[in-house]
Amino acid sequence: GISWIFLLQVYAAVECEEPSAFHRTVFVFVNASGGETHARGGCRAFRSQLPRENAYYAIDPLPEGMRGHALDVELDTVRKARCDRWDVTASEAAATLRAPTRTYPEYELVVENEERATDPTEGMQIIEDNVGDDMTADDLDEIEADVYDKDNEQLATFHVMLKSDPDQVLRYCYDDGAKPLWPSVTHAPNEDNIPCCERCGAPRKFEFQILPTIISKLDVDAESDYALDFGSIAVYTCSKSCAPIECDEASQKSGAYAEEYVLVHPPLNQ
């Protein structure tokens, strides 16, 4: 099967009616062959969540510097019964899993407000004039030039955003109607057919995008097979943050993680 490398996780509690979404995290994995990240299925995202009252975390945050307690025998039995293949101890993992082929350096994502003067939606209108009419060679040349200009305008907007904060590697916005800022118009993934959540049927919504600036932070030789190459990664999640389901013992599928939807813009040099 395909080998995957853990890229990052985003702890993102959201305001919703689902009580199990108090502790909520989205994990992102990429294809171990970094150049395949933008290929279909080359990047995957999984959502996991817990209610405020649970066996793992205290209801209120622990004082700074204080460590949580280990699970007692009863709670550990409950954990093992969840059929959760990711929820294993270090010794359990060593006994059943081979060592990962690659791990990236560990960093902390620091949250700051993004301030930009430009409108990211400018220059993204699709050409609709003359559709269906007979076109001359001059008409086609004019349209091609217009598309080229729109791509240049979009790329300039994208570069201004990156230049304004070179250390920014992720953009997060869970507001209704939020959209990613793609580096181009013509090569941007189609956002019109984002599938609904397979668990509950609710529509998915844009939650965050990963910027190509993260590539330089991963300490990987650009010529290596592990080197990532993408224009931007957008993650769409269930708008209801639906609750975990019971695990399927027969197929050994975990009920604790919901796979979400990912779109990847191809590398800027393609």
Image (cartoon, rainbow, N blue to C red):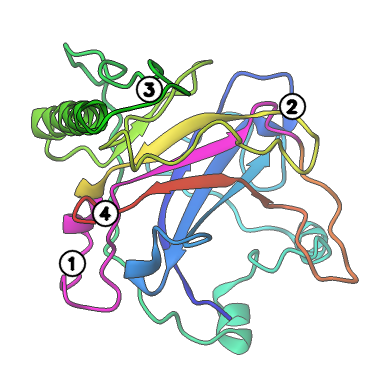
SS at mark 2 in the image: helix
Numbered disc in front, either 2 or 4: 4
> According to the image, label 3 marks what residue?
126
> According to the image, label 2 marks what residue?
19
> According to the image, label 4 marks what residue?
267
SS at mark 4 in the image: loop
Please identify the residue farthest to the right as the structure is shown: 250
Return the disc, 4 or 3, that comes first in the chain's sequence: 3
x, y percentage for residue 117?
Answer: 16, 11
Residue in the foreground of this view, choosing between 115 and 268: 268
Real-space CA distance between mark 4 and mark 3, rounded to the nearest whole angstrom: 22 Å
Residue 171 painted magenta: no
Residue at the spot x=65%, y=41% of the render? 49
Residue 52 visible in the displayed image: no
Residue in the foreground of this view, choosing between 189 and 223: 189
> According to the image, label 1 marks what residue?
219
Quadrant of the image for the N terminus?
Answer: bottom right
Label 2, residues with CA under 10 Å away: few <14, some 14-19, many ≥20: some
Return the disc, 2 or 3, that comes first in the chain's sequence: 2
